[in-house]
Amino acid sequence: MTIKLVSWNVNGIRAVSKKNEFWDWFDSTDADIINFQEVRAQESDIPKKLLNRDGFDTYFNQAEKKGYSGVATYSSIAPLNVTKGLGVDNLDSEGRVLEVEYPSFTLFNIYFPNSGMNAKRLDFKVEFCDVLLDRMLELTDNGVNVVLTGDYNIAHNPIDVYSPSNCEGKSGYLPEERAWLDKVEEYGFVDTFRLFDEGEGNYTWWSYRTRARERNAGWRLDYFYVNKDLVGKVKSARILSDVYGSDHCPVTLELDL
């Protein structure tokens, strides 16, 4: 059985739902599990057309603050369990985590914090990331396969940004953020896209302010990671850079289970 997963930071689900490009993609996708980040809406404010999708069960984790953060997962496969948050009060008020348990793996749909101007939220982000990694390791130590997706708000390596020298010291490319992904890989988790494409110029986010997408002056911030025991089941991993509607584009993962 092949399962196809998609992840996309939609930069506001109400805003993107007004765009034809979004519906062209959403109505034609063959994904079994769709993950959105930066939903920026309370569940009660989400358009009914998006709440009631034939063939999908929908799960949301919303921020306490209206119009901020939030994640959503649409699943055509019935999960065994869905958990909102990491179980840590000071980390869970922003609606950044959905942990969705399936028979063959546990999926984390994550909207990672931005470390902010002058790294003012870096400590919060590092704590968030470390608690998440501890949870992932708890699962893998117990023989559970893990899929981690979302907008990480981290460009891992120089190849993942259009101009490494210009990105030094900027949020999303700080040494502490990149070191966390180094640690994730040291624990055996694998960046699935790099299993298939080690080339340059592969980005998932482009600033709206500088027409960056036209110049492909982007950052790769959106990923699918899996634990090492699941790597042999990875059939494909792609960046859908031709899909518009947000300042991010979708990324995909296919698993042959």
Image (cartoon, rainbow, N blue to C red):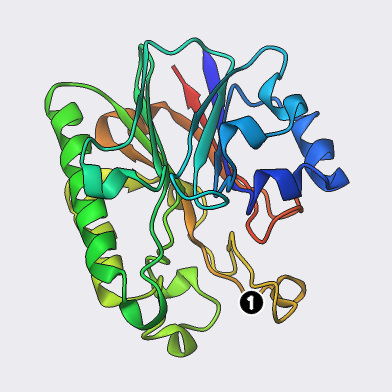
Q: Which residue is mark 1?
A: 217
From the top left corner, tell me how far across and down residue 142 is, in percent: 13, 22
Name the residue at 52% across, 53% down.
68
Image quadrant where one finds the C terminus: top left
Query: Taking 199 as reference, is 85 left or right?
Result: left
Q: Amino acid at mark 1?
A: Ala
Indicate whether 202 appears above or below 36: below
From the top left corner, tell me how far across and down residue 26 is, in percent: 75, 33
| Frontmost residue, 65 versus 53 | 65
Furthest residue toward right: 20
| Frontmost residue, 128 versus 240 | 128
SS assignment at label 1: loop
User: Is residue 188 in view from this perspective?
Assistant: no
From the top left corner, tell me how far across and down residue 178 is, in percent: 30, 67
Query: Taking 8 as reference, is 119 left or right?
Result: left
Indicate whether 106 appears above or below 220: above
| Dot 1 crowding, Cα within 10 Å, few <14, some 14–19, many 20+ | some
Name the residue at 24% across, 49% down.
90
Name the residue at 71% across, 29% down.
50
| Frontmost residue, 200 versus 24 | 24
From the top left corner, tell me how far across and down residue 150 is, in percent: 47, 46
| Frontmost residue, 150 versus 53 | 53
Indicate whether 236 appears above or below 65: above
> Residue 18 is drawn in which quadrant?
top right
